[in-house]
């Protein structure tokens, strides 16, 4: 059982590898019909990650293993997210974390081919291009879990075709596959050991923390695995941070979060949800604890809003600074020194025209 915890735990990938993979999407070698505004993480996993990690130089393996050419990498951070979110949003949230930016809406725009080079350069200048992340679609070996099956709704939004299945023939190990432990958990399964893996990583890396990539619909908070990961991270006293698409996505969502119940959570495999619920003896107390974690003073939402308030103060300082400059000086500075994506962000924060009229 230890290997099924330690092996996935060492399958992180640095941010530069994630961006390199992202830049391949849409090419003739890798999911040529990729549309960043339509394709979800599930779509990319099925049509890019699984095919690219099948019959590789490292066999049928986890994509992180292929991207890192077999090298093991410990993560600094674990990313909790939902596969129903756009893949571009997942990548945007990770990059926003590396930039220490609260929202990823602007970052997603900078993932466009004309902008991503400048974004890469900014990350290198900041020293976070090599930051390492554990992301399940890359770090879990899909060839021992889901590659040979499709689920309801597994249809490509561009082609209208069902996702392809993989014929690698590798033996699958679901969360309830034999042999099992006394509690019914499969011994050989990777995906039922996330809590153990988080504990392992917290011991190996004192700075290990969790990033929650929140989709615009906040569906991430309705996923059984994500709620289990949130609870485990709090139990382990890990640092936790939200990366939201934008501030306006919060509107109308807080009431829904107040009614959060683990019993209502969803999972692709019903056995996964049953396993998670079986580990929670007092579900009412668990639900209350999760609402405190997310909504209370000092909770995840409150801390995020505090960070945004600080950002607004910085924006106001920037605006006043620009006002004290002559229009000519500001225009020269913006055109000569500031990358397009940064100009857009400054313009949004300060309300000042930085010379970027795109």
Image (tube, grey):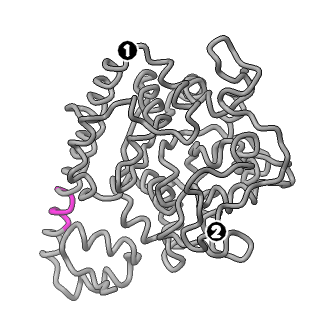
Q: Residue at x 32, y 74 (%)?
A: 344
Q: Position of residue 38 (x, y in %)?
A: 49, 69
Whether tag 2 and tag 1 are in contact, CB under 8 A, the answer is no
Q: Residue at x 36, y 55 (%)?
A: 101
Query: What residue sits right under mark 2 in the picture?
Result: 161
Q: Position of residue 104 (x, y in %)?
A: 38, 59
Taking the view exactly as shown, the residue that stands out farthest to the top is 182
For marks 2 and 1 on the same chain, the one whose residue lies earlier in the sequence: 2
The part of the chain drawn in magenta is: 313-318
Q: Position of residue 184 (x, y in %)?
A: 64, 18
Under tag 1, what secondary structure? Answer: loop
Under tag 2, what secondary structure? Answer: loop
Q: Residue at x 69, y 15 (%)?
A: 181
- In the rendered image, residue 251 lying in the magenta stretch gets the answer no
Query: What residue sits right under mark 1 in the picture?
Result: 282
In-front residue for pair 139/333: 139
> In the image, is 8 to the left or to the right of 120?
right
Quadrant of the drawing holding the N terminus: top right
Q: Is residue 275 above or below residue 29?
A: above
Q: Using the image, tell me which numbered label, if any, was put on residue 211.
A: none
| Dot in front, 2 or 1 | 2
What predominant SS class does the magenta segment belong to?
A: helix
Residue 247 occupies which quadrant of the picture?
A: bottom left
Q: Position of residue 250 (x, y in %)?
A: 25, 52
In-front residue for pair 206/212: 212
Q: Residue at x 55, y 23 (%)?
A: 199
Quadrant of the drawing holding the C terminus: bottom left
In-front residue for pair 184/66: 184
Neighbours of disc 1 within 10 Å: few (<14), some (14-19), many (20+) = few
Marks 2 and 1, how far apart at CA: 43 Å
Neighbours of disc 2 within 10 Å: few (<14), some (14-19), many (20+) = few
């Amino acid at each position: 059982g230890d290997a099924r915890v330690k092996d996935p735990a060492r399958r992180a990938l640095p941010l530069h590898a994630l961006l390199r993979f992202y830049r391949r999407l849409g090419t003739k070698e890798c999911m040529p019909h990729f549309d960043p505004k339509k394709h979800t993480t599930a779509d990319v996993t099925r049509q890019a990650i699984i095919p690219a990690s099948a019959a590789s130089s490292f066999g049928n393996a986890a994509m992180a293993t292929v991207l890192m050419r077999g090298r093991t990498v410990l993560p600094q951070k674990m990313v909790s997210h939902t596969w129903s979110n756009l893949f571009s949003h997942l990548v945007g949230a990770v990059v926003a974390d590396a930039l220490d930016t609260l929202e990823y809406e602007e970052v997603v725009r900078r993932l466009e081919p004309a902008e991503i080079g400048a974004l890469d350069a900014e990350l290198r200048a900041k020293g976070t291009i090599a930051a390492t992340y554990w992301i399940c679609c890359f770090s879990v070996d899909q060839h021992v879990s889901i590659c040979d099956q499709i689920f309801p709704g597994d249809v490509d939004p561009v082609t209208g075709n069902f996702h392809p299945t993989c014929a690698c023939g590798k033996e699958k190990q679901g969360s309830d596959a034999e042999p099992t432990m006394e509690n019914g958990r499969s011994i050989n399964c990777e995906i039922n050991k996330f809590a153990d893996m988080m504990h392992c990583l917290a011991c190996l890396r004192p700075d290990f923390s969790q990033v929650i990539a929140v989709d615009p619909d906040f569906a991430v908070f309705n996923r059984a695995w994500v709620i289990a990961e949130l609870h485990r991270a709090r139990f382990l006293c890990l640092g936790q941070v939200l990366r939201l698409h934008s501030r306006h996505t919060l509107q109308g969502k807080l009431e829904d979060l107040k009614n959060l119940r683990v019993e209502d959570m969803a999972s692709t495999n019903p056995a996964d949800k049953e396993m998670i619920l079986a580990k929670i003896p007092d579900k009412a107390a668990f639900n209350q604890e999760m609402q405190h974690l997310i909504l209370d003073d000092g909770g995840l939402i409150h801390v995020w809003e505090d960070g945004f308030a600080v950002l607004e103060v910085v924006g106001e300082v920037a605006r006043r600074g620009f006002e004290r400059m002559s229009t000519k000086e500001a225009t020269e500075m913006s055109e000569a020194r500031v990358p397009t994506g940064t100009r857009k962000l400054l313009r949004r924060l300060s309300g000042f025209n930085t010379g970027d009229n795109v």
